[in-house]
Structures are given as C-alpha cells and as structure tokens.
Amino acid sequence: MTTRILFVCLGNICRSPAAEGVTRALAGDADLSLDSAGTGDWHVGNPPHPPMQAAARARGYDLSPLRARQISPADFDAFDLIVAMDAENLANIEELRGGAGTPVRLFTDYAEGPEDHVPDPYFTGDYEGALSLIERCARGLLRDIAP
Ligand code: 4NP
C-alpha cells in the first residue's frame, strides 16, 4: 500500500522541496506518494529557491518541477505522515490538526545524530549543510517506513 508523506517547512522553497526531491530519489522501490508544503503563503506557486535548486542539481536531484503551496487542514486526511523541518513548523502544523490522528514528526528524528532541526539555508546560506542533513534524514526515514 502506498505511504503518503508530506514534508513541511516555512516557505516551501528550500528545505521541504529538497526533502521531497531527495526522498523521492533515494526511495528505490518503496511505494511512496510524496509532496511538500509551507506553513506560510509568501511563495505559493513559486519553484524552489534557485540556490537550493542549483545545490540539489549538483547532487543529482531535480527540484525544478516542484511548486510551493501552503499546508491546509485537509492535508491531515490526505497524508499518512507529516514531516516538519523544525519545532516552529511542528507547532504551526499542530494548530491545524483538528481531530485527525495523523502522526507529525521532525525530519531530524530519523537521522542518527545530534541535530534537532534542519537549519534554514534561506537564512544561513548553507545549502550544502542542509542537503547533507536532508540526505541523512531521508535515508533514516526510508529505513523506518520501508525496512
Ligand atoms: P524554507 O525557507 O522554509 O526552507 O522554504 C524559507 C524561505 C523563504 C522564507 C522563509 C523560509 N521567507 O520568509 O520568505
């Protein structure tokens, strides 16, 4: 059965589209349906931020087809798992929950390491560090859901 996973960050132009694209590329035969969204609406309809697209492309991930959208309460029914990039995302997602039982987790929960969030390269400028962490989180997530 298909596992539906939504990756969520603030703007949906850096971290969560990268998480979606990297996880899709690493998923192999896993039966997954992946999407991403932002808690904010500033960039709705926009492709991923060009520096993130370039850094991802250099590692073999094509993020160019992705377009930003904002998370909505309906996503709790449309997905089996919602994955947040940081604690602020997590809190904002929880505000939309209503009565749904859908699990919401931090992406870094799946990486074996000390990190407790994916730092936002839109503000830090560290696209390589973000992608390296996202790759570790994605591998851990894939091990967790499709062992
Ligand atoms: P993201 O990064 O949450 O990783 O997509 C951001 C990009 C843009 C903004 C915030 C975060 N912004 O406020 O425009």
Image (spheres, grey):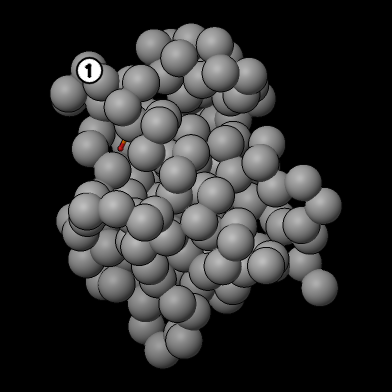
Identify which amino acid the numbered label 1 is placed on: Gly
Q: Quadrant of the N terminus?
A: bottom right
Left/right of residue 78 with respect to residue 88 in the rendered view: right
Q: Secondary structure at mark 1?
A: loop
Quarter location, residue 99:
bottom left
Q: Quadrant of the C terminus?
A: bottom right
Observer-nearest of 6 and 126: 126
Q: Position of residue 125 (x, y in %)?
A: 22, 17
Quarter location, residue 58:
top right
Left/right of residue 122 with respect to residue 58 in the rendered view: left
Indicate the quadrant of ligand 1 in the picture: top left
Residue 124 visible in the snapshot: yes
Q: Is residue 136 above or below residue 65?
A: below
Q: Position of residue 96 (x, y in %)?
A: 34, 71
What residue is drawn where x is 36% and y is 56%?
A: 112
Reading the image, the residue beneath label 1 is 125
What residue is drawn where x is 37% and y is 83%?
A: 98
Residue 71 visible in the snapshot: no
What residue is drawn where x is 57% and y is 36%?
A: 22
Q: Is residue 134 above or below residue 2?
A: above
Q: Residues within 10 Å of mark 1 (few under 14, many from 20)?
A: few
The yes-or-no answer for disc 1 within 8 Å of ligand 1 is no
Q: Position of residue 133 (x, y in %)?
A: 37, 39
Count of numbered badges drawn on the protein = 1
What residue is drawn where x is 22% and y is 66%?
A: 91
Q: Is residue 127 above or below residue 143?
A: above
